[in-house]
Amino acid sequence: MIPTEPPARGDAWFLSLSSSTHPDRIVWRVAGRLGAAGAAVLLDRVKASPSTGLRLVLDLEDVDYVSGAGVRAIETIAKGAQEGGGSVELVNLTEPVRICLELAGPLSCASSAVPG
């Protein structure tokens, strides 16, 4: 797990990340709020991991907020994956995150799945 702890007790703006590598994919479990600071952390961590040609799965089940910076980070990750011969799948979207992504417009390089 790569924690980015809240700087002060009660601060709601935090992000924690963990990843697991499988033969055909890397799963990134994201928790917290994906604002400007969190988006930069997510982008840095994903770019630093070897993922050429793999499917990246962003599990957003524990994300309760995504800002415009978060949407841009997801789009950047998706474009980079596609350019490297891979793909990105967004899974377990909470209702607020799903609505935010829908309002932002289609993410051209990512697919999303919400298990039933």
Image (tube, grey):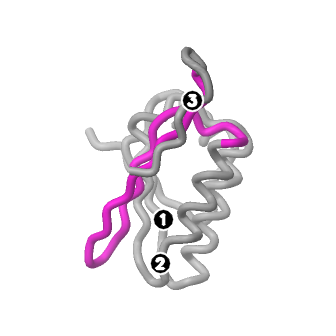
Specify whether residue 40 is painted magenta: no
Gap in angstroms between the C-alphas marked 3 and 2: 27 Å
Q: Nearer the viewer, residue 19 or 3?
A: 3
Q: On the picture, is 26 further left or further right than 39?
A: left
Which secondary structure type mostly characterizes the magenta part of the structure? strand
95 relative to 40 in the view: left or right: left
Residue 69 lies in quadrant = top right
In this rendering, the label closer to the viewer, 2 or 1: 2
Q: Is mark 2 in CB contact (under 8 Å) with mark 1?
A: no
Task: From the top left corner, tell me how far across and down residue 23 is, in percent.
Answer: 26, 78
Question: In what element is the residue under mark 1?
Answer: strand
Q: Amino acid at mark 2?
A: Pro
- How many callouts does the rendering have? 3
Q: CB atoms at circles 1 and 3 under 8 Å apart?
A: no
The mark that comes first in sequence, 3 or 2, is 3
Please name the amino acid that badge 3 sits on.
Pro
Residue 110 locus on image (x, y percent): 53, 61
> Which region is colored magenta?
12-37
26 magenta-colored: yes
Q: Which residue is mark 1?
A: 88
Q: Is residue 99 visible?
A: no
Tag 2's secondary structure?
A: loop
Distance (Cα) linking label 1 and label 3: 28 Å
- The residue at which mark 2 appears reads as 50
Quadrant, the C terminus: top left
Q: Which residue is mark 3?
A: 6
Q: Is residue 27 above or below residue 99?
A: below
